[in-house]
Amino acid sequence: MHVYIIGTGPGNPALLTGQAKAAIEASPILVGDKRMLAPFAASGKRLVATYRRDDICQLAASLSDEDGPMAVLVSGDVGFFSLAALLTDIPGCTVTRIAGISSLVYFAAVLQTTWNDAFIVSRHGRRESLVAAVRQHRKVFVLTGGSDSPAALCRELCQAGLDTVSVAIGCDLSYDNETILRGTAADFTDRPADSL
């Protein structure tokens, strides 16, 4: 069975790479989070809503070569804090990773800035120190997640005396309701939680 692991970029299907579009077109089975599968609801393909490694491996093992290929859609880029890291060795399968646009690359473009000089902190299922990063680096990019919303992270900065640090927040990147906010950490401490 051939399995494509496809970076879907920030979410808008218009931002899929040509290679990603071709692999999706060739795959009768698409697997991924509901948000990533939604654009393909009318495609006639079999859609399997899961992002659990064990479920994906079990599904792949249940299929024959004639059933595939299968495409696993992951957010962002396959090499940037991605589920793809857990899917490098699906037993009995040939796995091909296809790059996507990471949220960092997309957000930097929207902000009209470079990203090669950004220090990266992930708070998406991790507890990396944002305060230490901001104190040590001129530009810090933070992946948020769970209870670590932009407001919670801004409160963390304010509690450390960094309330005047410049902050840019990107919500729903690439979607029609994309929102970009700029201000200081103190400006966003009471912001409602954002899902994306």
Image (cartoon, helix red, strand yellow):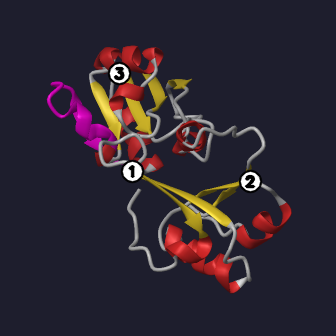
Where residue 60 sits, quadrant-wise, is top left
**Do callouts 3 and 2 mark residues in contact (Cβ within 8 Å)?**
no
Question: How many neighbours does mark 2 have within 10 angstroms: few (below 14), some (14-19), or many (20 or more)?
Answer: some
* Rendered image: mark on residue 172: 1
For the point 52% across and 34% down, the residue is: 90
Q: Is residue 95 above or below residue 136?
A: above
149 is within the stretch colored magenta = no
User: 189 left or right of 178?
Assistant: right
Element type at mark 1: loop
Q: CA distance from mark 3 to mark 2?
A: 36 Å
Which amino acid type is marked by label 1? Asp
Task: Magenta stretch: give its range.
Answer: 36-51
- Disc 3 residue crowd, few under 14, some 14–19, many 20+, Cα 10 Å: many
Estimate the x, y position of residue 149 in percent, counting from the top left: 49, 69
Q: Residue at x 58, y 34 (%)?
A: 89
Q: Whole-percent x and y of residue 24?
A: 35, 21
Q: Does residue 193 show up?
A: yes
Q: Please tell me the numbered disc located at residue 16.
A: none
Q: In front: 71, or 159?
A: 159
First reached walking from the N terminus: tag 3 or tag 1: 3
Which residue was labeled with disc 3?
Answer: 24
